[in-house]
Amino acid sequence: MTDLAPLTLPAVDAGTEAWSAWLTARTTDQLDAARALVADLKSQRPREAAVLLERWNDVNLALGNAFAAAGLLQQVHPDEAIRDQAESAETEAHRLLTDLSLDREVYDLMVVDNAEQRTSGLDDDAERVRNFALRDFRRAGVDRDEATRDRVRAINERETELGQVFGRHIRDDATTVRVRPEQLAGLPEDWVEAHPAGDDGLVELSLEYPDVVPMLTFATDRDARVAVASAFSNRAWPANDDVLVELMALRQEHAGLLGYDGWPAYDAEVKMIETGDAIASFIDKISKAAEASALRDRDILLERLRQDRPDAEALDAADTRYYTELIKRERHSVDAQEVRRYFSFDRVRQGLLDVTGRLFGLGYEKVDVPVWHDDVTAYDVSLAGARIGRIYLDLHPRANKFNHAAQFTLTDGVTDRQLPEGVLVCNFPRGLMDHDDVVTLFHEFGHLVHHVLGGHQRWARFAGVATEWDFVEAPSQLLEEWAWDARVLADFATDDQGEPIPADLVARMRQAEDFGKGLHARTQMFYAALSYRIHQDPPADGAAIEALSRRLQADYSMITPLPDTHFHAAFGHLDGYSSGYYTYMWSLVIAKDLFSQFDRDDLYDAEIAARYRDRVLAQGGRKDAADLVEDFLGRPFGFEAFATWLEE
């Protein structure tokens, strides 16, 4: 393996000019290179498929570099000018991708008339690259008439713009909630100390997760919880109503122009689920499987709620987390505030590296390199002593930063060309963490490990997390299991005196976590149903979106929305995941089956972990996800492990 050098970023304080020049080199210059490669391809018109595919690989690599830099910096860079430049660069990249996907001359070159003559010597990977390219061309509409291609091109460009606006409205919403100091009763002492009252005597709360989650979990004052939950569910509203209406209508038109019965049918064609109708069937299957558990949990929560409010008729977004925490404390002797003291951020971050290093045979070396913000830490990743990638951890909230949790690509790894580099972008507190935060960190780090281990492919098309979109969450959901194992946690979950978290407490935590999983599954199916239905039957206006959302919440979830709230406006997955939010639960079904192969008494079993690493993660997109899973399991994946877990 060639020892490739990672990218060199400008210094954190390099200024707008230096960062702009770097971004230009990674976007505009790479796009110009891609254009030149395409022009050369069309002028040279190579007869051999092997030569054609090598040139095609170069085009994909250049395009991927541009998309990665633009997509990351618009979400994390503190300089507004750089974020704006990144958005413009992403638009330019989408425009080039659209033009290329509709280029009939390139498509005709890719089509092989005499297969025996033109494809001789292609291995399975190269043939897969070619087949995927042809499929992508046809799905883009390259074989349609000129008027249709022109309309698709215009739609693609507008969809990109709307997606950026949708995300920006969420990211830049600076709404705050102000409460009286006494309304912080029930919150952890260290959290209260970090939220002093201002000159007006009130405490200002952001709508970032480190403020919202503790308030909804611990605040005894219901009025304060209602204020926070309502504001959180009104982010980006009403600004995003018109954005969603136009975006949904365009996607429907887009799919129709290409001969599909709605956007879900178009989107599902390249996923494991294969058809749009199957999404609706899967949602109903999970909902039915979770119904008994969800009803039982709901009734327990309502019973406890009515001890405090005898006239309460339903659970709502201001009460669900709070009373779930009470049930865990009262029925399972699990106090989240007691649990928090074992999860200091610094120890958790190091523990995560130690756990994944031991599990997958990886080494992490912290490196002092330029980054975009002082909060960011960087590590070189090695396997068997050889550097295989670099990761960046950007884990605390700040203004104008992506405010959820996700892994972003900085570079895709291509053998002998460039190292895989990935970025984890989250919003965790700097001090003590809730265990839910720890689980989230393990989950998101699973994407990062997948990106690095899968980032050693000959073909850019298969680099990193390049499998079907309804599989990509499975490796991350699998890694969550290590955040629940007492033996694993004992190595890093310690209090200030160095005492590890007690095994019996972890066991109670697991029992407590099992409470509510039916409710959680039904809520997830509400999200999945909304993402599906809003695309299948696009609403005409914001009021229609709200009506659809509330109807589906009543059908699937057992939690009632607060009055005058508009959850959909900040449901960011409606852009990136479009009609495919079901993928989280689909992936969880697979993750539970994958986990069934691991030894519960020894989660570090080297043989099992290496087999999973090499047969699933390291393969990137070289095989269909179902085949990767079957290679590891020794059989096709099934529903049984998930059903058993749901019923436990």
Image (spheres, rainbow, N blue to C red):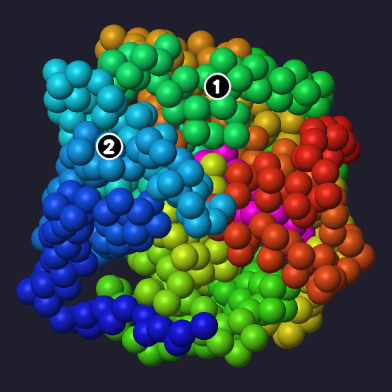
- Choose between 569 and 47: the one closer to the eye: 47
Find numbered disc 1 in the image and state the secondary structure of the residue it sits on.
loop
- Choose between 193 and 601: the one closer to the eye: 601
The residue indicated by pointer 1 is 275
Location of residue 273 in the rendering, given as x and y in whole percent from the top left corner: 60, 29
- Choose between 109 and 351: the one closer to the eye: 109
User: Relative to 252, is 572 above or below?
Assistant: below
Q: Residue furthest right?
A: 601
Location of residue 159 in the rendering, given as x and y in whole percent from the top left corner: 24, 32
Q: Amino acid at mark 1?
A: Thr
Q: Residue at x 14, y 65 (%)?
A: 29
Q: Residues within 10 Å of mark 1 (few under 14, many from 20)?
A: some
Q: Residue at x 76, y 79 (%)?
A: 491
Q: Residues within 10 Å of mark 2 (few under 14, many from 20)?
A: few
The residue indicated by pointer 2 is 108
The answer to whether residue 620 shows anywhere in this view is: yes
The tally of labels here is 2
Q: Residue at x 68, y 42 (%)?
A: 626
Q: Name the front one of labels 1 and 2.
A: 2
Magenta span of residues? 469-484
Left or right, 395 with respect to 55, comes to: right
